[in-house]
Amino acid sequence: MMPPHEKAKSALKAGQIAGRRRSEFAIIEDYFAPLTQGDPLAYALKDDAAIIHPMPGMDLVVTVDGMVAGVHFLPDDPPEEIAQKLLRVNLSDLAAKGAEPLSYVLTCAWPRDLSLEWIERFAQGLSADQKRFGIHLIGGDTVATDGPLTLSLTAFGQTPEGSMIRRGGARPGDVVCVSGAIGDGAAGLRIARGEACEIDAAGRDYLLQRYRRPEPHLGLGQALRGIAHACADVSDGLLADAAHIGQASGVRLVLQAAKVPLSASAQSTGLDRVALITGGDDYELLFTLDVKAAGALSALSIETGVALNVIGRVDPRQGTKSGACLLNEQGREIEVAEMGYQHF
């Protein structure tokens, strides 16, 4: 009798051989054309381009994110969850702009030994999230590579003309707010890597899901149109993304570490608060608004079903260095080695 591990190898090899025998166009027809959901302007993925018609009076919003195995996800993560993270991080960018999703294009650089089963499960993950978030595929490209699995998704959304929320609109004296909880992504990554964390099974599962399948706050982003002066999603880390808003706006965001909301699960890992704040992969919305509008946060939280917290202010002084800083409970600036994740 063949040992279980040899059976697994044999099954994988069979899938790889089958994958090499299938043409690129057969794979697209079988697994990805159904993701167009019959959109006639996607041309069943048989053309080199598609057409997008935003509704009258709407602006088209475009965003793109890439993911590489070993950098943005672990190579042995479930294919369905890799697909869903890829789609959701782009939806989170649309949420930060106050946009509603329309469609997307996808580029996949598949390792040559990737099995058809893996590709099928990847497409199933996209299909499930498409239905949930109201978006569909309209095109893309597939190539083979000798390098790591590399994925890129470009998402299209729409906002009423002139209403897209930019990073560069924060004003001196604004309050700084964040949705949900920060640090779950960083804690989930450590668990996924097998690093020691003293946490129960339920907490481990929660943090893993927060890392692998972040929740894009599309409804909140749309509700912030006309209210938020600036907005970004927290991908590189709360402090780093606050600095991005500050630099784009020419102001300085001053965050209070003690006010940054952390989940009970993240806190139970014993990880340092600053490490959680700067860890990234949370995909919460970080935004600024006029202090007079801060009183509406409670109603907005109830309306959208998303927890909202004030975590700082935009420095009201003119001529301060743009960016962001983190203060301790005594009001002194905390020195951090890295503000967030950097690719270079």
Image (tube, helix red, strand yellow):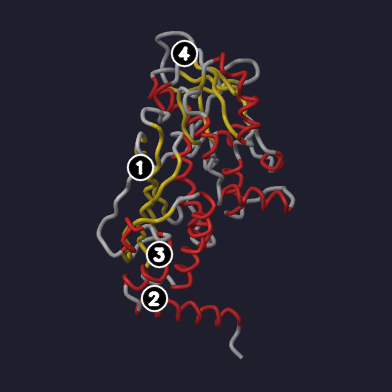
x and y percent of residue 184 in the render? Answer: 61, 42
x and y percent of residue 260 in the render? Answer: 62, 28
Q: CA distance from mark 4 to mark 3?
A: 47 Å
Residue designated by label 4: 172
- Residue type, mark 1 in image: Pro
The label on residue 294 is none
Q: Which structural element holds mark 1?
A: loop
> In the drawing, does residue 51 fall left or right of residue 279?
left
Of callouts 1 and 3, the N-terminal one: 3
Of callouts 4 and 1, the N-terminal one: 1
x and y percent of residue 215 in the render? Answer: 56, 45
Q: CA distance from mark 1 to mark 3?
A: 23 Å
- Residue type, mark 3 in image: Phe
Q: CA distance from mark 4 to mark 1?
A: 34 Å
Of callouts 2 and 1, the N-terminal one: 2
x and y percent of residue 301 in the render? Answer: 63, 30
Is 243 drawn above or below residue 70 in the view shown?
above
